[in-house]
Amino acid sequence: MMLKNFKGFGSLAIHAGHIQDPMYAHLTPLYASSTYVYDEAEQGMRRFSGKEPGYIYSRWGNPTMSEAERKIAAMETYRIEKDGQPLEAMAILHASGMAAISSLFMSTLKSGDKILTHYSLYSGTEQYMKQLLEPLGLSAVIVDLRDLELAEKMLQEDPQIRLVYLETPANPTLQCVDLQALSTLAKQYGKITACDNTFATPYLQQPFKYGVDFVIHSTTKFLNGHGTAIGGVLVGTDMEFMQTTATRAHRLLGGNSNAFDAFLLVNGMKTLEVRMQRHCENAMQVANYLDSHGAISKVNYNGLSSHPDYAVSAKQMSHPGAMMSFELKDGFDAGVRFMNRLQLCTRTVSLGTCDTLLSHPASMSHSSVPREQRLEYGITDGLIRLSVGMENIEDILEDFQQALP
């Protein structure tokens, strides 16, 4: 079946990327081999020179990993056309989301370049920029990219900016930036754009539709969907760049995935549509419940009309998604008490699994960050981050009711 013939995203998620195994296995097997052999020396020569397709070494590629890559590329480009033809993209699977970000930065930037980015980012990405890139002569310009006039001013005044790096919805305040407006500005000034699409997934948002050049995912989250494997992916539409420069960076950095994690990812992605539908349905009801609760001062959910980025989210996402955060009125102690009282929902970091996950950044993931810096980024003492799961909504709400004061 040709990709263009899939009538629905669910069918695509199940079938796209699959190539019949030579031994006729129903599912692509887990190819647990570090290296691959050749029928003759000349075949090895052809493969190393690129004249013949085929696998060489699993750091460079593996059949199980390839299926995951093809499936993700198909989902991110589903029903998108360029010049009247289906948009083509290439995905490179990594050991983690941070490994995928490393390949992006190392393949697109050189010493002296700058990254223009939003101030609400995943903390690991921001730490990477500050702790690893700055010593290499690279730096990040962090501003509020919801202010398009400010974004253009920065692009006008600083020719060293090479990459506009976006994350929308952002972690953990669910701030959303305008993908189309920012990618248009970036192209106007000769810059490239990348978007972390982890929170949204390609089911809810496709950054390539709005002119973004690269898409990043932590596949650990919603794409895998079950919390069974760590992974990341870099997807790009410049096929020559992806096949050469990006592939070279990926191979030399060594942040490759492995057959087992790829196998789990492939099978997790097959249920992405039905999982996201349940996640989203539950999330909207949870957000409305929290928004009306007396112990909560604020709910950060881009599906509520009170969220400052509600309109932007509605423009580029088919649904606001399953992630949110909320602030308890009584601060740090209230956050700890609430977490301790949970009985059904799970106290942990990460997101995107079948069960509802909650974390208290001030006492957990951001406990080592100075309070002033946390507050600057909207991570208050009583902030709770929430990944709404797939349990029956009545059970989720009952747990919240008994845990909240």
Image: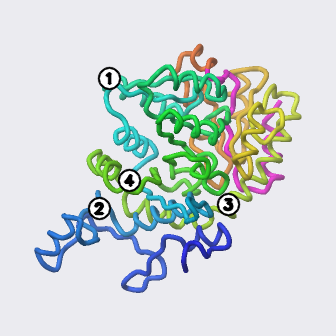
Task: Return the residue at label 3.
Answer: 275
Q: Position of residue 218 (x, y in %)?
A: 51, 48
Picture disc at residue 348: none
Which residue type carries mark 2?
Answer: Ser
Task: Return the residue at label 1.
Answer: 135
Which residue type carries mark 3?
Answer: Arg
Marks 3 and 1, how far apart at CA: 42 Å
Q: For numbered disc 3, what is the local secondary structure?
A: helix
Q: Residues within 10 Å of mark 1 (few under 14, many from 20)?
A: few
220 versus 192 height, above or below: below
Q: Residues within 10 Å of mark 3 (few under 14, many from 20)?
A: many
Picture disc at residue 58: 2
Q: Nearer the viewer, residue 87 or 354?
A: 87
| Residues tagged 2 and 1 counted as in contact (Cβ below 8 A) | no
| In magenta stretch: residue 3 | no
Q: Quadrant of the C terminus?
A: top right
Q: Nearer the viewer, residue 356 or 312?
A: 312
Q: Position of residue 232 (x, y in %)?
A: 46, 50
Does residue 130 appear to the left or right of 347 in the view shown? left
Task: Return the residue at label 4.
Answer: 242
Q: Which of the two marks, 2 or 4, is nearer to us in this view?
A: 4
Q: Position of residue 60 (x, y in %)?
A: 29, 59
Q: Residues within 10 Å of mark 4 (few under 14, many from 20)?
A: many
Does residue 98 appear to the left or right of 325 in the view shown? left
Q: Nearer the viewer, residue 88 or 338?
A: 88
Q: For numbered disc 4, what is the local secondary structure?
A: helix
